Image (cartoon, coloured by chain):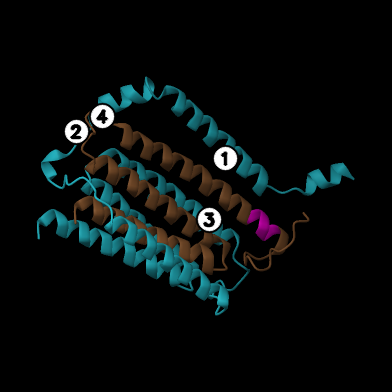
Chain colours: A brown, B cyan
Amino acid sequence: MSALHLCLIFSTLLFALGLAAALSRSNAILVLLGVELMLNAANINFIAFWRFSPQFASNPHAGVIFAIFSIAVAAAEAAVGLALIIAVYRHYKNVRLQDADQLKG
Amino acid sequence: MSLSLLIFILIAIATLGSAAVALALKNIIRAALLLVVSWVGIAAFYLWADAQFVAFAQVLVYVGAISMVVLFGVVLTRRAPVSVVDTTVTPSMRAVAGVASAGLVALAVVWGILGTELPQTSSRAAAPVVNMRALGLELMGQYAAAILIVGALLTVALLGSVVVASHEEKLMKNEK
């Protein structure tokens, strides 16, 4: 088993933790944190493939730059997610996802 | 077992352990703080993998900014005097089904990874050298369009989140 295998298994377990949180928790903030954890697992995969792939000589920075852009998009996603949670809270006075069951504004 | 592998396993255990405990906790502030530990562990993984710049970006964005945004979200959405927000894991079929499906996904992906032939470049000497200057020049040259688009995306997303989260009462009155 190579180091790349270990990194991929690490990121898979992190992804599974995030998925379990996003599916089973009812607090909207914890669901958002689970989604963030899944995004982090994807970033770990970018860096692992960049670090342990044999043909990085053609473009030595591609993996790093991809991970940086991915982190920037994750930051935007977190801001929008928290804004949506605050909007839901103002409407329902609650952040339980089971209570937010209307499409009407 | 080499030292590098030992460090990786310690980082992985710290990251996965803190994330697992955080996502099972009832107190949401403690969960957010433990997730910060998990993000620091991921930054340590980036340092281990010789991606220093990404590690610093991870610390700045996740440990610095997103954790603060999450804590603000927790404080703004907590119900008045109660110190512990009710975030009990619903003892329903939904929680069981969620954890079971996540476990199935993990099993399937790990099975796929173990059955795949991957390049065996585990030697530490083979690390690609990241030159900060070259990285900056590439961001300004080959990836200039991408970085402009990310800047526009961040601006639009933050303005949009302000609009979504701001009060709408004045707008409603004007419409009436």
Q: Which residues are magenta?
A: A86-90
Give the chain of mark 1.
B
**Which residue is identified by label 4?**
B132
> Given the image, on which type of amino acid does mark 2 rest?
Val
The part of the image, by quadrant, that contains residue A86 is bottom right
Eye-nearest disc, 3 or 2: 2
Give the chain of mark 4.
B
Image coordinates for residue B137, horizontal then vertical, percent: 32, 22
As measured in the structure, the alpha-carbon distance from the residue carrying label 4 to the one carrying label 1 is: 28 Å
Give the chain of mark 3.
B
Residue B83 in sight: no
Q: Where is B35 relative to B144, above or below?
A: below
Which element type, helix, strand or loop, lies under badge 2?
Answer: loop
| Residue A95 falls inside the magenta stretch | no
Which residue appears farthest toward the right when viewing the image? B176
**Which residue is identified by label 1?**
B158
Q: Where is A10 relative to A68, above or below?
A: below
As measured in the structure, the alpha-carbon distance from the residue carrying label 4 to the one carrying label 3 is: 34 Å
- Is mark 2 in CB contact (under 8 Å) with mark 1? no
As measured in the structure, the alpha-carbon distance from the residue carrying label 4 to the one carrying label 2 is: 10 Å
**Which residue is identified by label 2?**
B129
Q: Nearer the viewer, residue B109 or B139?
A: B109
Which element type, helix, strand or loop, lies under badge 3?
Answer: helix
Eye-nearest disc, 4 or 3: 4
Q: Quadrant of the C terminus of chain B?
A: top right
Eye-nearest disc, 2 or 1: 2
Eye-nearest disc, 4 or 2: 2
As measured in the structure, the alpha-carbon distance from the residue carrying label 2 to the one carrying label 1 is: 34 Å
Q: Which mark is residue B72?
A: 3
Mark 3 vs mark 1: which is more N-terminal? 3
